[in-house]
Image: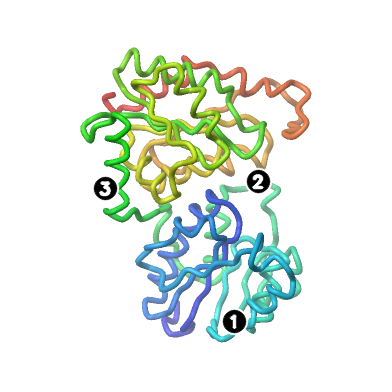
C-alpha cells in the first residue's frame, strides 16, 4: 500500500517527442491518485509543453530545452542547480538520456528512477532496459516504472486537455476556411519524421477526393512546420472542400482540430496519439515491419483506433535503407483505407 506522504515533491521527466509525451500522460493521473497532496511537476521539451499544459493533476510544467537554452553542458549544470532549489524527493525518468540523468543527480533528487542505460549509474533505481525486445507497448513500459514503485495504474487512457478558448479559436478558423460548426470532416496528417513512415502523398490526395465525392465530407489537412508543401499539393485537387492548415497551428490548436473531427487518418506519428488523447478514432498507417517500430509498440491505443500495416514478406526490415523502396507502404491501397473509414461505425 502506498504511503501518501512518502513523497512531497515529484518530478516526471519525458524529454523526447510528441507521441511519447502523450503516451506518458496516464502516469500523471496515477501519481496524483497515489499522492493527492504532493507537488507534481513534469519536465518536457519546449515543443511538447502544450501536451501537458493545463493538466489539472500537475502543479508545474518545467522546460528542458536541450536544443537551445540548455544545449551546452555548462548551461545544463546551471539548470540542475536551479532545479535543486525545488527540492524534489522523487524523479521518474521515463526517457533516459545522459543529460537528464546527470541533471537529476546534480539536482540532488533523493530517489532517481529510470532505465539502466545512458549514464544509468547516476540513478538510485535502475530498471532493465528491454524496450528493443518489443515485449510490450511503449505505454506499458511507463506503467512498469509505476509498478516498480508499487503505485497502482488507475488509467490507461492518454489525455490532452484543450481549453474552451482554443476550441473557439479553431472553430472560427475553420469557419473562415469554409467549414461550418455543423459540417463533418476528416482530419488527415500526411507527414512523418522519416520516409519509412510516409504513405505516398498521391494516396492521401485520392483518399480525400474519394471521401469528399462519395460522402460529402470535408477534409482538413494538418502538419507541423515543413509540411506546407504537402498540404498545398493535396488541396489543389479540391479547393472548395479541403482545408489546408499545415504549418498554421500550435499543438493545442491541432488537438482541437482533431477533437472535433469525425475520424483522423495519419501516418505513424505524434498526431496518432494526440487524436486518441482527445477521444477521436484514428486510422494509423504503418510501414516498417520492424519488431520495435511497429503497431505492437507504437500503435494507437484507443478502443476504436485502427492500425494498418501490410506484410510484403521482408525477412528483415531495414527502415532507413529499404531495398524494396518501401513496398509495404505502397501495398496499402486507397480503397483499403477508405473501407476502414466507412466501417468505423461513425455514420459518416
In the image, residue 151 lies at what x, y percent?
A: 48, 69
Q: Which residue appears farthest toward the front when viewing the image?
A: 176
Q: Is residue 306 left or right of residue 14?
A: left
Identify the disc placed on residue 16.
none
Residue 109 in view, yes or no: yes
Q: Nearer the viewer, residue 94 or 165?
A: 165
- In this rendering, the answer to whether 277 lies above or below 15 is above
Task: State which tag comes first along the sequence, 1 or 2.
Answer: 1
Precedes in sequence: disc 1 or disc 3 = 1
Q: Residue at x 55, y 40 (%)?
A: 269
Secondary-structure class at tag 1: helix
Q: Disc 2 or 3, which lies upstream in sequence?
A: 2
Q: Secondary structure at mark 2?
A: loop
Question: Where on the picture, by quarter, is residue 195?
Answer: top right
Q: Nearer the viewer, residue 154 or 280?
A: 280
- Marks 1 and 3 in Cβ contact (< 8 Å): no
The nearer-to-camera label among 2 and 3 is: 3
Q: Position of residue 348 (x, y in %)?
A: 28, 24
115 and 108: which is toward the camera: 108
Residue at point 66% right, 68% down?
A: 70
Asked if residue 186 is positioned above or below residue 168 in the image, the reply reads above
- The reply to whether the C-beta atoms of the residues labelled 2 and 3 are less than 8 Å apart is no
36 to 192, vertically: above or below: below
- Taking the view exactly as shown, the residue that stands out farthest to the left is 182
Pointer 1 residue: 82
In the picture of the structure, the residue carrying the numbered disc 3 is: 168
**Between marks 1 and 3, how big is the CA–CA gap?**
37 Å
Mark 1–mark 2 distance (CA, rounded to whole Å): 37 Å
Amino acid at each position: 500500500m502506498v504511503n501518501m506522504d512518502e513523497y512531497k515533491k515529484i518530478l516526471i521527466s519525458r524529454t523526447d517527442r510528441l507521441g511519447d509525451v502523450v503516451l506518458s500522460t496516464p502516469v500523471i493521473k496515477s501519481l496524483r491518485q497515489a499522492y493527492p497532496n504532493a507537488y507534481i511537476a513534469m519536465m518536457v521539451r519546449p515543443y511538447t509543453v502544450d501536451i501537458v499544459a493545463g493538466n489539472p493533476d500537475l502543479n508545474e510544467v518545467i522546460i528542458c530545452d536541450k536544443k537551445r537554452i540548455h544545449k551546452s553542458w555548462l548551461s545544463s549544470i546551471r539548470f540542475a542547480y536551479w532545479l535543486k532549489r525545488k527540492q524534489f524527493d522523487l524523479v521518474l525518468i521515463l526517457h533516459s538520456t545522459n543529460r537528464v540523468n546527470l541533471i537529476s543527480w546534480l539536482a540532488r533528487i533523493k530517489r532517481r528512477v529510470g532505465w539502466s542505460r545512458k549514464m544509468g549509474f547516476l540513478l538510485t533505481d535502475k530498471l532493465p532496459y528491454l524496450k528493443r525486445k518489443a515485449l510490450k507497448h511503449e505505454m506499458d513500459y511507463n506503467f512498469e516504472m509505476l509498478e516498480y514503485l508499487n503505485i497502482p495504474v488507475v488509467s490507461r487512457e492518454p489525455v490532452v486537455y484543450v481549453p474552451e478558448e482554443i476550441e473557439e479559436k479553431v472553430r472560427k478558423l475553420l469557419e473562415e476556411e469554409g467549414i461550418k460548426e455543423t459540417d463533418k470532416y476528416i482530419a488527415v496528417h500526411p507527414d512523418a519524421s522519416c520516409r519509412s513512415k510516409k504513405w505516398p502523398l498521391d494516396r492521401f490526395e485520392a483518399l480525400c477526393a474519394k471521401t469528399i465525392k462519395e460522402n460529402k465530407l470535408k477534409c482538413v489537412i494538418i502538419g507541423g512546420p515543413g509540411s506546407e508543401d504537402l498540404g498545398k499539393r493535396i488541396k489543389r485537387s479540391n479547393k472548395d472542400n479541403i482545408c489546408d492548415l499545415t504549418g498554421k497551428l500550435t499543438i493545442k490548436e491541432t488537438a482541437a482540430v482533431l477533437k472535433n473531427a469525425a475520424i483522423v487518418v495519419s501516418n505513424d506519428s505524434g498526431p496518432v496519439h494526440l487524436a486518441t488523447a482527445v477521444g477521436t478514432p484514428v486510422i494509423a498507417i504503418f510501414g516498417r515491419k520492424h519488431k520495435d517500430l511497429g503497431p505492437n509498440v507504437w500503435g494507437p491505443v484507443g478502443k476504436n483506433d485502427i492500425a494498418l500495416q501490410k506484410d510484403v514478406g521482408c525477412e528483415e526490415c531495414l527502415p532507413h535503407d529499404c531495398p524494396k523502396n518501401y513496398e509495404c507502404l505502397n501495398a496499402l491501397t486507397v480503397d483499403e483505407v477508405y473501407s476502414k473509414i466507412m466501417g468505423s461505425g461513425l455514420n459518416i
